[in-house]
Amino acid sequence: MINQRPVVFLAFANDRDQHLSTLNDESRAIYDVLQPLQQNNTIAIHREESAEFDELYDDLITFDGRIVVFHYAGHADGTMLQLEGGNGSAGGIATLLGQQTSLKLVFLNGCATKDHVKLLHDAGVPAVIATAVKISDTKATKLATAFYAALAKGHSIVDAFESARGYIEGKFDDDVSVNLTVNRHPNFNFDMDEQKSSQSFEFEWTLYTREDSVVDLENWRLTQLQKPVIKHSSSNNVSSLVSMFSGVGIGIMVGFVISLVAPQSEWSKLIVAIFVGVSGVGLAVLIGLNDRHFSLGKGLRIGSFGLAVALSVMLGVYVRDNHIISPSMADRALELQKVIKGITNQQLIELLHDNKT
């Protein structure tokens, strides 16, 4: 498997009627803080700016086994995520995410997503960041950016969450007005009693972890993920077979040319044999018959070349010895009689025989 980098999956879904003005800012900000990890091939970032359920399903299948973080931002409540073109039920999404064997964290950055947590934990997801109340669009963007910035610097999930929490509490301390305008609940309008109730919570977001995943999450770092593993077993087998094919091709070429070469004297044969042998070795070296820079195409070219040369030599020898494209014996005899006046038949036969051999 080549280039199988772990994936951070970012899904965003907006609403024309209940538009979240900072959703695009959140997408860009998260991407920017994670981009250095993508540039050094530690992770791959996948963004769905207008997530629909069918697209989400296709992407989860495509990146099966590679997704380590799933982030959703948009309208939500305890029963669903409001995707574009229709809602995605909490149970269905939990089932799909639970099939991601490498998944460490699901971040549901929408209003009142706490009810998703049990479903996700039951599905096997180790950590979930969710909310119990309606949240401010602005604060949600700032929190997510701060969290992923810490994660990208090598913090654990727990430490990154605590850092982001400290940032939000420091920046928005007692700033109730930030929650009065836009929130991420599909029921966009809510009265001041609900607003006050939301403010009664110590902090809107909570990190929920499975008990059996605590130690693993403490040691897990986004910056220290295992680099893509390239499985060489099958490719090595193919490379070996092609290499053998190439070597056999060159060997056949050299062997047949040596055995079928035209010169009759021993010295001539020796000289041609040395020349062809050196040429064969040079061909193997120059074209690249070596393991370090070997490729399937290169091997096929080398082997095909050798076999083509060998077959061509055999065909050429057959054509030459059987005079397929040369004058017949009778024609040659007539030509010799014209050139050599008074030659006897016995002399003509001997001359033609000597010329043939």
Image (tube, rainbow, N blue to C red):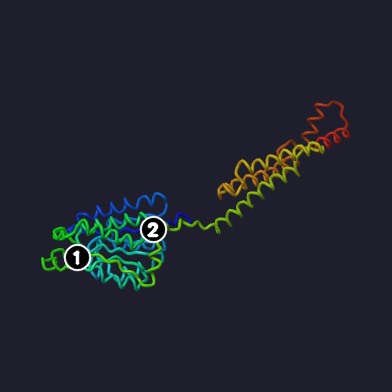
Q: Nearer the viewer, residue 273 or 318?
A: 273
Nearer mark to the viewer, of 1 and 2:
2
Q: Nearer the viewer, residue 343 or 78?
A: 78
Q: Which mark is residue 222?
A: 2
**Identity of the amino acid at label 1?**
Lys
Q: Nearer the viewer, residue 174 or 18?
A: 174
Does dot 2 land on a helix, a strand or a loop?
helix
Percent from the top left, x then y, of residue 237? Answer: 58, 57
Residue 225 vs 78, above or below: the answer is above
Residue 36 vs 97, above or below: the answer is above
- x 22%, y 63%: residue: 75
**Identity of the amino acid at label 2?**
Leu
Percent from the top left, x then y, of residue 63? Answer: 39, 60
Does dot 1 land on a helix, a strand or a loop?
loop
Q: CA distance from mark 1 to mark 2?
A: 29 Å
Q: Nearer the viewer, residue 3 or 296?
A: 3
